[in-house]
Image: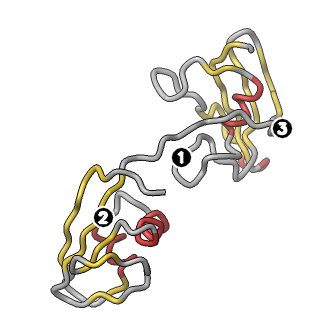
Amino acid sequence: MVRGVQEILEFLVEEEDRLDRFLARSYPDFSRSYLQRLIEEGYVLVENQVITKPSKRLKPGEKVLLLVPEPEPLEILPENIPIRIVYEDAHLLVVVKPCGMVVHPSPGYTTGTLVNALLYHVVILEIFTKIALVEPIYDLYHFCGHLQHVKFTRK
């Protein structure tokens, strides 16, 4: 999917390296896997040529352009994912977050998150603003998960 470009970053290669590694070091705001995806989608130019191979070898003196795309719209959908509810009242829900479950959607994690599961069970009032949607209350590492509390209203 081609998206608009919000920023163009320019880098000069100082020593021989792979394109994806070079960009990961030069622009640590993005993960290497995300940069690899941008390369494969045509958002990186070396000496004004679009390069789609993350393993491209760079030479000293080459100019690399990273076209930073506009953020992808993030649609958060309810998913019927079983969650263990420890406590519930009219405005508070405490659940056990399973080990390995991502808390909220983000680039690379758009499904299977705790927020997706919670949206199936409740309507969240404020997701990422004034309240902490999911904030550890007490870590239970020997159970490989931890309790999370959520402010909500019922469907």
Q: Which residue is mark 3?
A: 82
Q: In the visual, does 111 lie left or right of 31?
A: right
Assess whether mark 3 and mark 2 are in contact (beta carbons under 8 angstroms). no
* Quarter containing the C terminus: top right
Residue 47 horizontal/vertical position (percent): 21, 80
Q: Which residue is mark 1?
A: 106
Label 2 vs 3, first from the N-terminus: 2
Q: Look at 36% across and 54% down and name the residue there.
A: 69
Q: Quadrant of residue 82?
A: top right
Label 1 vs 3, first from the N-terminus: 3
Assess whether mark 2 and mark 1 are in contact (beta carbons under 8 angstroms). no
Q: Amino acid type of disc 3? A: Pro
Q: Is residue 120 above or below residue 54?
A: above
Q: Quadrant of residue 116?
A: top right
Residue 15 horizontal/vertical position (percent): 23, 88
Q: In the visual, does 39 lie left or right of 77?
A: left
